Amino acid sequence: MFVKLTKYIFYDLLKSRWVLATFFFYALVVYILLEFGRSVEKAVVSYGNLSSLSLSLFSLLLSTTYLYSNRNFFEFLLSQPVKRSTLMLSVNVSLSLSLSISYLLGSLLPFYYLVGYNQSFFRCVLLNLFLVPLFVSLGILSSLLVEDRIRGFGFSLFLWLFFCVFYDAILLYLVIALSDYPVEKMLLTLTLLNPIDLLRLTLLMEVGLYELMGFVGRWLANYLKDLWFLPALLSALYTLLVFLLNMSVFKRRDF
């Protein structure tokens, strides 16, 4: 049943404009950065930052939109002998796969055609892929917690703004407010809790620009330079935690 549901939802998503728009958006961004950028290294850094912000937003909006738009279909499936855990897992996997494939093809195909193989860019794309299931799960959580569509979209946008903007503002405030105290370890811990910030640090370390991130970047460069996959592991852990929370909410949800 899981395979059948996943295939159906996945093929349904492939017909969506979201998937095609994601592919052409990233292909166009790669082309513009390489054609008008001064170097491949700067293009990789710019693309890594841009794609981490946009891919998390696309994942949130697509998952929230899909669940609100197909609520009647999910209610019908739940009236059949389909376990809620199976349905939830199928939706997560299908949404993550569709977005990941469109992002992967839209990023790698034009880059390989224009430049060829580049290890830094390949790692950048690979690490960004782990943001997809995490923010897909957060988008599903938004639609489960908030029944109203408009409020659900608002909550999803708030989550995106929190991880991409507000979180960094809070860290900056802590640095200023606690400047007289040794807060390096605390700030490092808080940085590890945000997968987007950690991904940015790893990308800058990959191209040798870690000093732009201050003492946190220097610390990571000294101790974690060989653990470039750390953001992927932490993102996978956070995804699992959010998925388990989704399962708990979904099982108690009365459709």
Image (cartoon, helix red, strand yellow):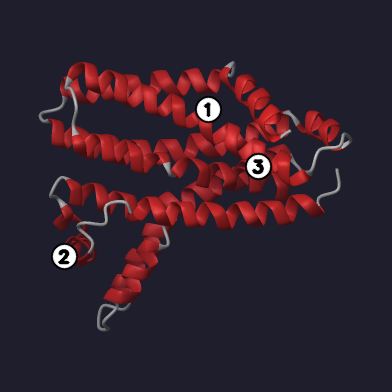
Which residue is at a point 68% across and 38% down the rendered structure image? 150
Q: Position of residue 105 (x, y in %)?
A: 38, 23
Query: Is residue 249 placed above or below 111 in the rendered structure?
Result: below
Which image quarter: residue 179? bottom left
From this view, report whether residue 2 is shown above or below residue 209.
above
Tell me the residue at 53%/51% (across/down): 239
> Element type at marker 3?
helix
Tell me the distance, in whole angstroms, between the alpha carbons under discs 1 and 2: 37 Å
Image disc number at residue 98: 1
Q: Is residue 146 visible?
A: no
CA neighbours of label 2 inside 10 A, class few (<14), some (14 to 19), many (20+):
few
Side (left or right) of 25 relative to 12 = left
Mark 1 or 3: in front is: 3
Q: Earlier in the sequence, mark 3 or mark 2?
A: 3
Q: Are marks 3 and 2 in contact (CB under 8 Å)?
A: no
Q: Which residue is tagged 2?
A: 222
Question: Exactly how many numbered labels are in the figure?
Answer: 3
| Residue lying at the far right of the rendered structure | 79
Image quadrant holding the C terminus, namely top right
Q: In the current view of this chain or complex, which residue is farthest to the left? A: 38
Q: Amino acid at mark 1?
A: Ser
Q: SS class of the residue under badge 1?
A: helix
Mark with earlier residue (1, 2): 1
SS at circle 2: helix
Asked which quadrant contains residue 87, the reply is: top right
Quadrant location of the N terminus? top right
Q: Give the foreground label among 3 and 2.
A: 3
Give the residue number, with chain letter if any, for mark 3: 89
In the shown orientation, is residue 27 left or right of residue 84?
Answer: left
